[in-house]
Image: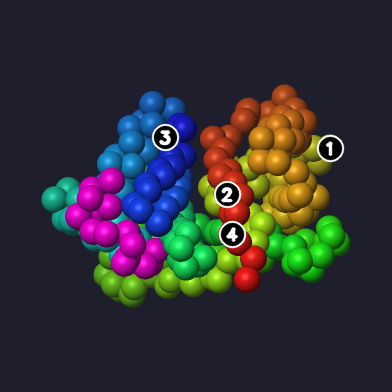
Amino acid sequence: AVGGDFYKLIVDGDHILVACGNCGISGAAGLVRGLQNVAMLEDIASRNSIAGMPAGEVLDALRSKYARMAERDGGRHDVDEDVPVNFTVCIVNQKERTLSYAGAYGSLCLIRKSYPGTSRREVDVHEFRGDRMNFAVSFGRRKNYTTENIVLEKDDKIYLKTDGYVNQRGGASNARYGDQYLRQLLMKHASEPMLEQKRVFEQEFENWRGANRGNDILVIGLALKVAGK
């Protein structure tokens, strides 16, 4: 957990689960909430095989845990600091070369070469936004979270994030950094090694925020080495 942001990686044979979220609070309280979310993910993974569990079912299971917590706490169903503001889950099947994704106000970006199998450097960005359905406000509806199944290509790069980076205020107009600038940054540096991208993103964030207070931020990059077809 990083302040109010948290993440978890779980490996189960050929399957890798990666998840991240934002509790909506920062500091020590956010750290505790984040660790609770990590523990709930670990519990779900220990009770189920992620190899046969779509990403949407992971979110359904997490929501059920929060619903039970709310019932024990007087039946509260409102959005409060106990419930993540956003949550993203993806499960990579390395053998089948597929990715299962689901989001509760959590997005995933896929960066892919426009011309696979060639030396051309153009890239496309595909953004998956998931369901606009927070855990708390969806207790009563019980609509299942949607799973997106993605067939992976050689050299695909996947990015999961919370909202801290794009919501950071700075620049000449003290505006939000915004999703559009982040997408442009991802595309510009997509061909670079992940460690170099990390350095660039950190420097860009610091330059943008200037003297402003920094948000809790979390960006996870996955470089998928999938054999070509």
- Give the answer, above or below, for where 119 lies relative to 19: below
What amino acid is at disc 2?
A: Leu
> What residue lies at 55% left-to-right and 59% top-to-bottom?
107
Sequence-earlier tag: 4 or 3: 3
Q: Residue at x 40, y 43 (%)?
A: 8
**Residue denoted by label 2:** 222
Q: Is residue 205 visible?
A: no
Q: Which residues are magenta?
A: 42-57
Q: Are marks 4 and 2 in contact (CB under 8 Å)?
A: no
Residue 172: which numbered mark, if any?
Answer: 1
Q: Mark 3, residues whose alpha carbon is within 10 Å: few (<14), some, or many (≥20)?
A: many
User: Which dot, 3 or 1, sits closer to the camera?
Assistant: 3
Spatial CA distance of label 4 from label 3 is: 29 Å
Could you classify mark 1 by the number of other residues whose Cα lies within 10 Å: few (under 14), some (14-19), or many (20 or more)? few
* Location of residue 59 by image quarter: bottom left
Mark 1 / mark 4, whichever is N-terminal: 1
Circle 3 residue: 1
Circle 1/circle 4 CB separation < 8 Å = no
Disc 3 marks a residue whose amino acid type is Ala
Q: Is residue 156 above or below residue 11?
A: below
Q: Please, what is the three-letter code of the amino acid marked with disc 1? A: Ala
